[in-house]
C-alpha cells in the first residue's frame, strides 16, 4: 500500500503532492492540537498577559494619560498606601465582600433547600429567582438607585407607612453606613441566584439513602443538615464561595452606578477607586497600582482552586 | 422499618412552610423589575408626589417616557451598537473556544495541561484588574471610542469562559465515536465538525446564550473605552447619557432600562433551561 501511494504521488503534479504532505503533517495529533489552540493562545497572550505586564509597568512609572512617563520604582505604591482614601477603600472592600459573600452563602443555601422541596410552579419560581442574575446589572442597579432615592424612596415610603421609621426616613445613598448597606443589598440581590442555583444542583446530587441512613440513626432534620447536607455540599460550596469572593471584591458596576464611591469615599472599592484615579483623574500609574492590589487575592484564590481541582 | 412516610397533616404543614418561605425571595427578586416598569409608565407629577402610593399607577398609564427615549435620544443607535457588538464578539469567541476546547479536552500533546491551566486562570481574572492597561492598548490599536474596541476586548473574558464550559461537554462524548470516524478515513477537522460538534450542541447553545448575555450586559469596558454618545452600548447609554446635567429623569431612565433589558429577557424566557445548566456547570462568574 505504501508503495502504491508513492507511485501515485510521483505521477501526480507537484502542487497536490505538497498539499498532501501538508495534510499528513496537519493530521498529526500534536500539530493539530497546537493549531487549534493557537487563536485562543494569541488572544490570551496579546490581550490578557500583555496588558497585565503593562499594568505592572504602569504601576512602577508616573504614567499619565497622554504622557509616556518614566520609571519611578515603588513610589506609586508608597503614595497609595499612605493615602487616606485608599485605606478607607481597603476597609470598605473587606466589609463589602465579607458581609455580601456571607449573606449570599447563608441565604443561598436556605433558598436552595426551599427550591429543593416539592413545589408547585417550580419552573416559574426558579425563573423568577434567577432573573436578577440575568438582567444587565448596571440597569437593575439604576432601578435600585431610584428605590433608594433621597426624597421619593419606595423603601422609606413603605417603612414610614408601616411605622418603622419616622418621616422623612434615612437618606440611603447619602449617609455612610446606609450607603454601604444599600450597596451590599444590591450585590446580594444580584448574586443570590448564582449561589442558590448552584447549591441546588449540589443538593440534587446527594443520594437520598444518606438522609434515610441519618434518619435511622436518629438524626433530626437539623442533624441531617449538619451531618449529611453540609459535608456533601462542601465541594460545591467551596467553588461557589471562592468564585464569588473574587467577583465581589472586584465589583465595579453596582458601586459605580449607585454611589460612585460616595458619600465621602465610604463605598469605594478597588475598581471604582482605580477608575476614578486612573481614568477620571488621568493618573494611570497610580490607578494601575490600585487595581493591582486585587492581584494577591486573586492569586491566592486561583492557587486554592487549582489545588482543589487537581485533588478531585 | 419504614422511613419517609408522613401523615397528611404534616405534609400540608410542610408545604405551607415551604411556600411561606419562598414567597419573600420571589418578591425580593422581582420587585425592582416591577418598580422599573411602573415607574416608566407614570407621569412626572405622580412620580414626584410624596402623597401618592409608589406601588401603583393612579393617574393613568402614559407612554411619554418611551416616546422621549426613541424620539429625542440616541437610544435606537445604542441598541443597534449593542446588538452588533454582542453578535460579532460572541460568534468570534465561540469559534476560537470550540477549537481550543476540543484541543484541550481531547488531543494529547506536550503542554496540554499547562494550556488548560492558563485558560482557567484567565477565566478567573476579573475585567476590573485589566481595564486601565486595556484602555491604552485600545488607543494604540487605533480603536478608541469605536464599537470595535469592545468587539476586540470582549473575547478576553468570553473565550476562557466558553473554552472551559465546552471542555466539559467535549469530555462527555465517547472517544470511540471519534476513533471510528478517523479509521473510516475522515480527517481530524471533519471529525470535529461533523461528528463532535453536533454531539456537543447543547454546550454550544449554552455558550452562545451566555456569550450574548455577558456582552450585552457588560459595563466596565463599555464605560471606559467609549465616550462618544453615538458609539455607546445600550447599557452605558442609558446609565450615563440619559442623566441630563446632574438630574435624574427617572421616568425615561426606567423606560430605557426596561427596553435595554428586553432582548435579554426574551432570550432568557426562551432558553431558561440552558441558563440553569450553564450556571450549574459551575463555570460561570457570579
Image (spheres, rainbow, N blue to C red):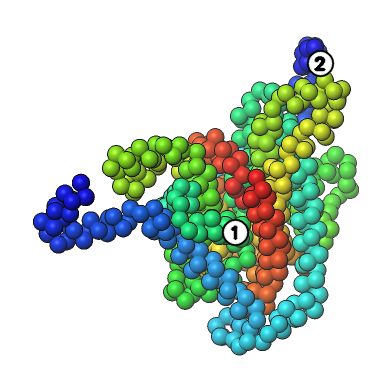
Where's residue A250, x and y in %? Answer: 68, 60
Question: Do marks 2 and 1 both belong to one polypeptide chain?
Answer: yes
The chain to which mark 2 is attached is B
Is A155 displayed left or right of B104 in the figure? right
Quarter of the image with the N terminus of chain B in it = top right
Residue closer to the observer: B205 or B75: B205
Q: Nearer the viewer, mark 2 or mark 1?
A: 1
What separation in Å lies between label 2 and label 1 (alpha carbons)?
49 Å
Q: Where does label 1 land, which residue?
A: B121
Residue A269 lies, with reference to residue A287, above or below; the image says above
**Residue A79 in the image: above or below residue A124:** below
Residue A55 appears in which quarter of the rendering?
bottom right
Residue B123 lies in what quarter of the image? bottom right
Mark 1 belongs to chain: B
Element at label 2: helix
Crowdedness near tag 2: few (<14), some (14–19) or many (≥20) residues, C-alpha within 10 Å: few
Upstream in sequence: badge 2 or badge 1: 2
Amino acid at each position: 500500500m505504501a508503495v502504491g501511494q508513492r507511485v501515485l504521488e510521483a505521477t501526480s503534479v507537484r502542487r497536490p503532492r505538497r498539499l498532501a504532505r501538508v495534510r499528513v503533517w496537519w493530521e498529526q495529533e500534536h500539530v493539530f492540537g497546537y493549531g487549534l489552540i493557537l487563536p485562543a493562545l494569541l488572544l490570551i497572550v496579546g490581550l490578557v498577559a500583555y496588558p497585565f505586564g503593562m499594568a505592572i509597568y504602569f504601576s512602577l512609572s508616573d504614567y499619565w494619560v497622554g504622557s509616556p512617563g518614566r520609571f519611578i520604582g515603588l513610589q506609586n505604591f508608597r503614595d497609595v498606601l499612605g493615602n487616606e482614601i485608599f485605606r478607607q477603600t481597603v476597609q470598605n472592600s473587606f466589609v463589602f465582600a465579607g458581609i455580601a459573600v456571607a449573606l449570599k452563602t447563608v441565604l443561598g443555601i436556605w433558598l436552595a433547600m426551599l427550591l429543593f422541596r416539592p413545589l408547585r410552579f417550580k419552573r416559574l419560581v426558579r425563573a423568577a429567582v434567577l432573573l436578577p442574575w440575568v438582567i444587565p446589572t448596571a440597569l437593575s442597579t439604576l432601578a435600585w438607585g431610584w428605590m433608594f432615592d433621597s426624597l421619593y424612596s419606595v423603601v422609606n415610603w413603605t417603612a414610614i407607612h408601616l411605622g418603622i421609621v419616622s418621616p422623612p426616613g434615612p437618606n440611603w445613598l447619602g449617609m455612610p453606613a446606609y450607603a454601604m448597606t444599600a450597596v451590599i443589598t444590591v450585590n446580594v440581590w444580584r448574586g443570590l441566584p448564582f449561589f442558590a442555583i448552584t447549591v441546588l444542583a449540589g443538593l440534587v446530587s446527594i443520594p437520598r439513602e444518606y438522609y434515610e441512613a441519618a434518619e435511622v440513626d436518629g438524626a433530626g432534620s437539623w442533624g441531617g443538615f449538619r451531618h449529611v447536607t453540609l459535608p456533601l455540599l462542601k465541594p460545591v460550596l467551596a467553588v461557589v464561595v471562592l468564585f464569588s469572593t473574587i467577583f465581589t471584591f472586584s465589583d465595579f458596576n453596582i458601586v459605580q452606578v449607585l454611589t460612585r464611591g460616595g458619600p465621602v469615599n465610604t463605598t469605594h472599592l478597588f475598581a471604582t477607586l482605580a477608575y476614578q484615579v486612573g481614568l477620571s483623574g488621568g493618573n494611570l500609574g497610580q490607578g494601575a497600582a490600585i487595581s493591582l492590589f486585587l492581584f494577591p487575592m486573586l492569586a491566592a484564590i486561583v492557587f486554592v482552586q487549582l489545588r482543589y481541582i487537581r485533588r478531585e | 422499618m419504614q422511613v419517609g412516610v408522613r401523615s397528611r397533616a404534616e405534609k400540608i404543614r410542610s408545604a405551607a412552610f415551604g411556600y411561606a418561605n419562598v414567597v419573600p425571595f420571589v418578591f425580593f427578586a422581582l420587585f425592582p423589575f416591577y418598580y422599573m416598569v411602573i415607574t416608566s409608565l407614570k407621569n412626572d407629577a405622580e412620580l414626584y408626589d410624596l402623597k401618592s402610593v409608589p406601588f401603583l399607577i393612579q393617574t393613568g398609564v402614559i407612554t411619554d417616557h418611551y416616546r422621549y427615549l426613541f424620539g429625542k435620544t440616541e437610544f435606537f443607535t445604542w441598541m443597534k451598537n449593542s446588538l452588533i457588538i454582542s453578535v460579532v464578539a460572541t460568534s468570534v469567541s465561540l469559534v476560537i473556544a470550540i477549537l481550543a476546547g476540543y484541543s484541550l479536552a481531547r488531543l494529547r500533546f506536550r503542554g496540554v495541561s499547562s494550556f488548560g491551566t492558563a485558560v482557567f486562570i484567565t477565566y478567573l481574572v476579573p475585567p476590573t484588574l485589566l481595564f486601565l492597561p486595556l484602555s491604552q492598548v485600545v488607543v494604540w490599536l487605533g480603536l478608541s471610542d469605536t464599537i470595535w474596541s469592545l468587539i476586540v476586548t470582549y473575547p478576553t473574558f468570553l473565550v476562557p469562559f466558553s473554552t472551559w464550559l465546552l471542555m466539559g461537554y467535549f469530555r462527555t462524548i465517547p472517544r470511540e465515536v471519534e476513533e471510528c470516524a478517523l479509521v473510516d478515513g475522515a480527517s481530524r477537522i471533519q471529525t470535529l465538525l461533523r461528528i463532535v460538534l453536533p454531539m456537543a450542541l447543547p454546550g454550544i447553545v449554552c455558550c452562545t446564550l451566555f456569550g450574548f448575555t455577558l456582552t450585552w450586559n457588560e459595563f466596565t469596558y463599555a464605560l471606559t473605552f467609549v465616550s462618544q454618545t453615538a458609539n455607546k452600548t445600550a447599557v452605558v447609554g442609558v446609565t450615563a447619557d440619559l442623566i441630563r446635567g446632574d438630574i435624574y429623569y427617572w421616568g425615561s431612565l426606567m423606560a430605557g432600562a426596561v427596553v435595554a433589558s428586553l432582548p435579554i429577557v426574551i432570550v432568557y424566557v426562551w432558553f431558561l433551561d440552558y441558563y440553569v445548566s450553564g450556571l450549574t456547570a459551575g463555570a460561570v462568574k457570579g
